Image: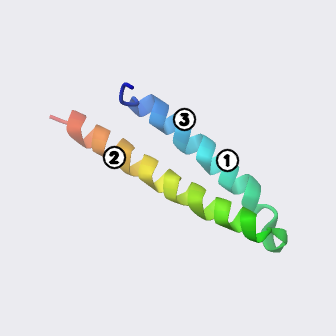
């Protein structure tokens, strides 16, 4: 499996952000399972952001 490009990671980050926003729009009506899912998605989004940062850092001369 090849490493993801910066563009692919940015698209993944945006997708995760949209899914988190969709869940959080439910506000206080979120189920415990939805709260857990949102927390897990936030962790994935942060990991993705870290990967983007590392790729960009490595590409700067």
Q: Which of marks 2 and 1 is nearer the N terminus?
A: 1
In the rendered image, residue 1, in percent from the top left (x then y), is placed at 39, 26
- As helix, strand or loop, the secondary structure at mark 3 comes to helix
Which residue lies at the image location 39% right of the left edge and 29% below the top edge?
Answer: 5
> Disc 2 to disc 3, how far (Cα)?
14 Å
Residue 53 badge = 2
- Residue in view at x 30 percent, y 39 percent: 56
Q: Report, in whole angstroms, how far the alpha carbon at label 1 lies from the one at label 3.
A: 11 Å
Rendered-image quadrant of the C terminus? top left
Q: Which of marks 2 and 3 is nearer the N terminus?
A: 3
Residue 8 position (above or below residue 50):
above
Percent coordinates x, y for residue 7 in the rendering: 45, 30
Label for residue 18? Answer: 1
- Say if mark 2 contacts mark 1, CB within 8 Å: no
Q: How crowded is mark 1: few (under 14 residues within 10 Å), some or many (20 or more)?
A: few
Q: In this view, does 51 lie above or below 61?
A: below
The number of discs equals 3
Residue to which mark 3 is pinned: 11
Q: Which residue lies furthest to the top in this view?
A: 2
Q: Sort mark 3 into few (<14), some (14-19) or many (20+) by Cα contacts within 10 Å.
A: few
Colour theme: rainbow
Q: In this view, does 60 lie to the left or right of 55?
A: left
Q: What residue do we see at 49% from left, 37% from top?
A: 10
Q: Residue 55, position in %: x, y?
A: 30, 38
């Amino acid at each position: 499996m090849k490493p993801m490009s910066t563009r692919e990671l940015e698209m993944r980050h945006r997708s995760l952000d949209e899914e988190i926003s969709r869940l959080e729009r439910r506000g206080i009506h979120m189920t415990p399972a939805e709260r857990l899912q949102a927390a897990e998605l936030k962790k994935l989004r942060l990991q993705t952001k870290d990967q983007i940062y590392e790729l960009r850092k490595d590409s700067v001369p």
